[in-house]
Image: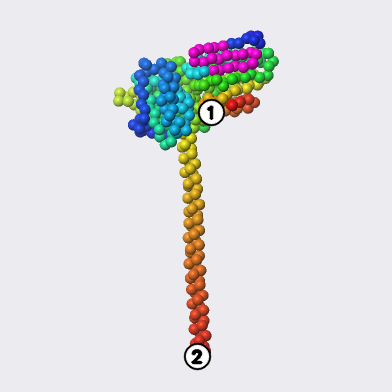
Amino acid sequence: MSVLGEFNSNAQRDAELLLTLPLALAPWDAANRVSVFLEAWLSGALLARGMASADVNFAVNELMENAIKYASEGSIELTLGFENSGLRIAISHPVTADRAQRYREIAATLITDDASELFAQIIERNAESANAPSLSAQPGGVSTGAGLGLLSLKMDYQASLAFAFTLDVMGAPHVTTQIWLPSPDSVYVHSLADQATRQMRVADQATRQMRLADQATRQMRLADQATRQMRLAGRRRGKENLQ
Amino acid sequence: MNANSSEKISTPDFEVRFTASERCVFLQGSLRLNAAPEYEPIAELMESALQHVASSGQSILVVDLRALKFLNSSGINLLYQFVLKVKKIGNVGLRVLGSSSNAWQPKSLSNMVKFMPAIELEIA
């Protein structure tokens, strides 16, 4: 298995919802129907987390569109689960070896490149080939626009992306695309954690200063004792001289 | 195309309409077409609206997205391609109207300013 990004290998095990869609029953319109269904299904749970259900509709639609375009045969497996104050959506399907290679290249670019620069590059490249037919229409090809949906999720929805490329038991290539959509709560939790860290740092400094103050008090006490002993010694010497 | 004419593509899911008198292209409903080839008729309608506005010496074209509830990434590509076309023509301004009640619009339209700094992007 080769992995790109922060891939959660337990996402399928921990998922709260699993849909298996045979490709034969997944025409283009399935992307729309599945995303509208999931938006409605999860709306309460999303609302409770301060997440916009329309964002999930967009995300699932993009993942489903990609899967319908690039899956070679068999079934599309879609899982959803709440994780770390966000929602993880994973989609998995078989691909041809050629497409797996192309998809891996696109995935690597999506993970490493600056999102807004990559967006500008794709839009400008699409403008140059505006009248050329989409490569996705050609067998084994991947559209020049491939990745625009995932890029939009990364750039506009602050989603993190991850990919895994595997071989199934029959040795056929398989790709899993995962996205994690953060909830506003998770941003809130982060800022709370930051605040707590800052306050602990301030408390640490205060503790250190109190310790220094204690040391100073102890040293002043020692100095007092020394002064007293010097005074006593002086008096003793005075008495000795008088005798 | 005369001043009162209107061009329209309409399906049960969406409608795209150019109203010459308002110099406005309206996109409404939910647009989830499959990649650039399926978006081609809409791209052509918008381009002919742009040509109409440019050739009639008007200074600005409006694209009203306030009733466009959903747009997939291929559709986002269509809008950005259009922004590049308007910029290339040079003598026509572009006003894009959106609504924050469509969750995708504040997120995915704001990058337009980078492609065409003179754009008037109004998301109410």
Q: In the figure, residue A97 lies in which quadrant?
A: top left
Please name the residue shown 63% across and 27% down the image: B117
In magenta, the rendered stretch is B8-28
Mark 1: secondary structure: helix
Residue B12 appears left or right of A172: right
Residue at numbered disc 1: B107
Please report the residue visible at 62 percent of the width from the left and 17 percent of the height from the top. B24
- In this view of the protein, which residue sits in the foreground, A195 or A157? A195
Q: Percent position (x, y) of residue A181?
A: 45, 31
Report x, y in % for residue B47. Answer: 59, 15
- x, y percent for residue A73: 36, 19
Q: Is residue A38 left or right of residue B11?
A: left
Gap between marks 1 and 2 measured at Cα? 98 Å
Whether the magenta-drawn stretch holds residue B62 is answered as no
Q: Callout 2: helix, strand or loop?
A: loop
Q: Residue furthest left?
A: A169
Q: According to the image, label 2 marks what residue? A: A243
